[in-house]
Amino acid sequence: MALLTNQKPETRVRRLPSESTTLATSLIIYCISSMSFSGWLPSFLACHWIAEGHGIG
């Protein structure tokens, strides 16, 4: 009985690492984005502005 109860949490624990990995990846991407925020924000705004201009024109 103890083995059966021990095996069930293992399958649950196996799911958690993938979720935590996704969270960690998201955090890393967020940190990189925040660090280079001043770099890509003007570029993004410029591209968005150009796209809006093309849409209107």
Image (tube, rainbow, N blue to C red):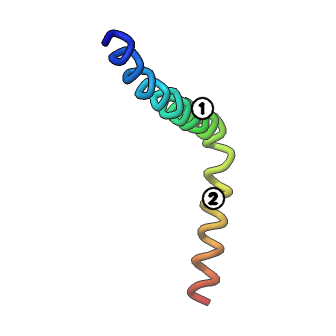
The quarter in which the C terminus is drawn is bottom right
- Residue 11 shown left or right of residue 40 in the figure: left
Left or right, residue 2 beside residue 46: left
The numbered mark at residue 41 is none
Image-based side of 25 in relation to 6, left or right: right
- For numbered disc 2, what is the local secondary structure? helix
Give the residue at the far top of this rendering. Answer: 2
Q: Which residue is drawn at 36% across and 18% down?
A: 4
Hey, which residue is sitting farthest front in the picture? 1
Q: How crowded is mark 1: few (under 14 residues within 10 Å), some or many (20 or more)?
A: few
Q: Foreground: 15 or 48? A: 15
Q: In this view, does 57 lie above or below 18?
A: below
Instruction: Classify residue 34 by image quadrant.
Output: top right
Disc assigned to residue 28: 1
Q: What amino acid does circle 2 point to?
A: Phe
Residue at 63% in and 43% down: 38
Label 2, residues with CA under 10 Å away: few <14, some 14-19, many ≥20: few
For the point 60% across and 38% down, the residue is 29
- At 60% from the left and 68% from the top, the residue drawn is 48
Task: Kindly indicate whether the residue at mark 2 contacts the one at mark 1 (C-beta within 8 angstroms).
Answer: no
Query: In the rendered image, which quarter contains the N terminus?
Result: top left
Report the disc number at residue 44: 2
Q: Please tell me which of labels 1 and 2 falls first in the chain.
A: 1
Count of all numbered marks drawn on residues in the image? 2
**Residue 18 at x, y = what percent?**
53, 33
Q: Which of 31 and 7 is in front in this view?
A: 7
Percent position of residue 8, x then y: 37, 24
Q: In which quarter of the image is residue 31?
A: top right
Q: Establish if 33 lies above or below 13.
A: below
Residue 33, quarter of the rendered image: top right
Vertical relation: 12 (above or below) 34: above
Picture coordinates of residue 37 (x, y %)? 61, 42
